[in-house]
Image: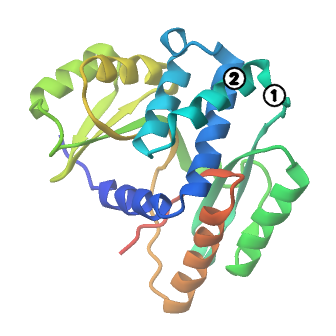
Amino acid sequence: MSGHSKFANIRAKKEKNDAAKGKIYTIIGREIAIAVKEGGPDPNNNFKLKFAIQKAKANNMPNETIERGIKKAAGGGDDVTYQVLRYEGYGPGGVAIIVDTLTDNKNRTAANVKNAFTKGQGSIGAQNSVSFMFDKKGQIFVDKEECDMDADELMMLVLDAGAEDMKEDEDSFEILTAPEDFDAVHEALDKANVPLISAEVAMIPQNTVSVTDEQSVKNLRRTLDMLDEDDDVQQYYTNWEEE
């Protein structure tokens, strides 16, 4: 097992997001709503909802807020329809950026995402203009300090559940799956009480790009900061190799 660490970047991003609870609560609230509409309001029979609730609690979302969100999505409130939209483009230094959004107003979201690219001296591209440089994979990170299993035991667990690979770094394990096997591997880890720092079906870059020009780095960070602050942005992916 080998691999370069993305864990520090994920943890830093999580801490940054933790400082903006309103944004996190909005994102998780929408994830709960989508999960309920797709699989029903019972987390025992809806693994996606179960994980969304776990994520909500990990971010200290009040139980009454969680319950209210579930009831509203199940038909106890205004019916809001969310669209999943993806935007692709380039930032400074030729960095490829994919932006996944969940929105009830696509015109607002399109304008905000375009503005984030423009402010950072980047540009929005056509659909599939950069996604061919990424692989769609289930990606799960386990914090080594919090995990009671050793590497071999954890690897056997995830491979038996259908994982493709597990990479080890000094502070984390990164587990990769085919998208269709993500839920099974995720559920196996959940049943084994393995603490996760993040779990998602992600777009993973096939190769990374370094940016050395100071102004380009500044502009790139401006774009990513604006995306971080946008409530409609669920996640973004880049092939930037941060120094």
Q: Residue at x 49, y 22 (%)?
A: 50
The image shows residue 79 at horizontal and vertical percentages of 85, 29
For the N terminus, the image quarter is top left
Q: Label 1 near label 2: C-beta < 8 Å?
A: yes
Q: Residue at x 18, y 52 (%)?
A: 171
The image shows residue 168 at horizontal and vertical percentages of 20, 44
Q: Kindly identify the amino acid type of the residue bearing the numbered disc 1.
A: Gly
Which label number is shown at residue 156? none
Judge left or right: residue 109 versus residue 92. Answer: right
The image shows residue 7 at horizontal and vertical percentages of 31, 54
Q: Quick check: can you spot residue 206?
A: yes
Q: How many numbered circles are shown?
A: 2
**Circle 1 residues within 10 Å: few <14, some 14–19, many ≥20:** few
Residue receiving disc 1: 77
The image shows residue 115 at horizontal and vertical percentages of 78, 72
Q: Hey, which residue is sitting farthest top in the picture?
A: 45
Q: Residue at x 51, y 27 (%)?
A: 179
Q: Secondary structure at mark 2?
A: helix
- The one of 70 and 28 positioned closer to us in this rendering: 70
Q: Is residue 237 above or below residue 62?
A: below
Q: Is residue 115 above or below residue 178?
A: below
Which label number is shown at residue 71? 2
Judge left or right: residue 158 versus residue 127. Answer: left
- The one of 145 and 72 positioned closer to us in this rendering: 72
Q: Earlier in the sequence, mark 2 or mark 1?
A: 2
Q: Secondary structure at mark 1?
A: loop
Q: Kindly identify the amino acid type of the residue bearing the numbered disc 2.
A: Lys
For the C terminus, the image quarter is bottom left
Q: Residue at x 84, y 33 (%)?
A: 81
